[in-house]
Amino acid sequence: MRLSSGLKHHIWRAAMRATPFPIFAKARDSAYWQKHWKEKLHANEFEGYAASTPLKKWFAKQVIDLQPKSVLELGCNAGANLRELNALDASVHLYGIELNDRAIRYGTENVVGKNAQLIQGSMADAKLLMQERDLSEVDVVFSSAAAMHCDDNIFAAAKEAALSLATTAIVHLEFNAWSPADLHNWRSWRDSFVSDRWIRDYAAEYRGDPRVERIETVGIPLDINFMDNIGRVMVSDVTGLVIVHLKPGSRQA
């Protein structure tokens, strides 16, 4: 009997909970995880991604405080973050890029309606996807627990796209490394067991870029963050908010 990918996932999670450490196995490459996020999400998962949470509301306020007139989310899933932005300021033009076309359909029908434009594609192609819609710039480009699922090559392309599109700021609410130990340990774990998380130092990714005016790092209130298990080790998908403030008038052509 061939097990479905969803059933295999649940069996694997149950096995991990029974062990003190992650079950070590051959790491999946980026292509595997991109295919997973593009094709293997089930319709019954979208309701969870679309849920309104205190963390989404808190994050939306951080973005709205930048006073954008337009925003682009990289890896928007069903658009729940965009919905929270719209609730705070309905005048902001909202765009989202998402690999999974079923998530886009669900989001358009049940989450954002006509308040946001959801675009199917990879965040690595964000600049081209926006240009195809005659959009050359937005005030803020952001991601939330999405860049963590991309390898370094995809993220590098997404970062360059963000730098070419954003006029005010680039914002990441992601699996952020706060110390060299974080970076070393989680990079090593990613290479040695079945994980879809790529940790990185998001502030360092932008530090020294001529477009950057300053970089702000913000701790997430613990009482609104979410944690899950890898084995008996508890982890949070998002561990830091990084706001990259850009110099006025310095957008790349």
Image (cartoon, helix red, strand yellow):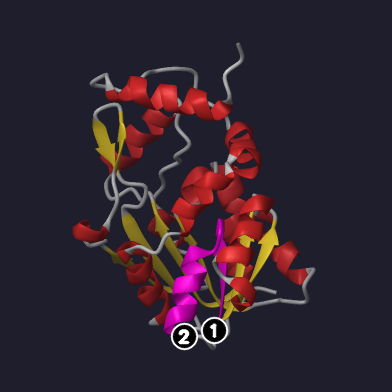
Q: What crowding class fits label 1: few (fewer than 14 Cα within 10 Å), some (14-19), or many (20 or more)?
A: some
Image position of 138 (left or right of 210): right
Which numbered marker is on residue 89? Answer: 2
Q: Which residues are magenta?
A: 69-88
Question: Magenta includes 50?
Answer: no
Query: Residue 156 at x, y = what percent?
Result: 58, 51
**Disc 1 target residue:** 92
Which quarter shows the C terminus?
bottom right
Residue shown at the point (40%, 69%) measured from the top left? 243
Residue shown at the point (38%, 65%) measured from the top left? 56
On screen, residue 117 above or below 152: below
Residue shown at the point (57%, 85%) measured from the top left? 249
On screen, residue 43 above or below 220: above
Image position of 35 (left or right of 239): right
Amino acid at circle 2: Asp
* Residue at the farthest top position: 1
Amino acid at circle 1: Val
Query: Residue 190 at x, y = what percent?
Result: 43, 31
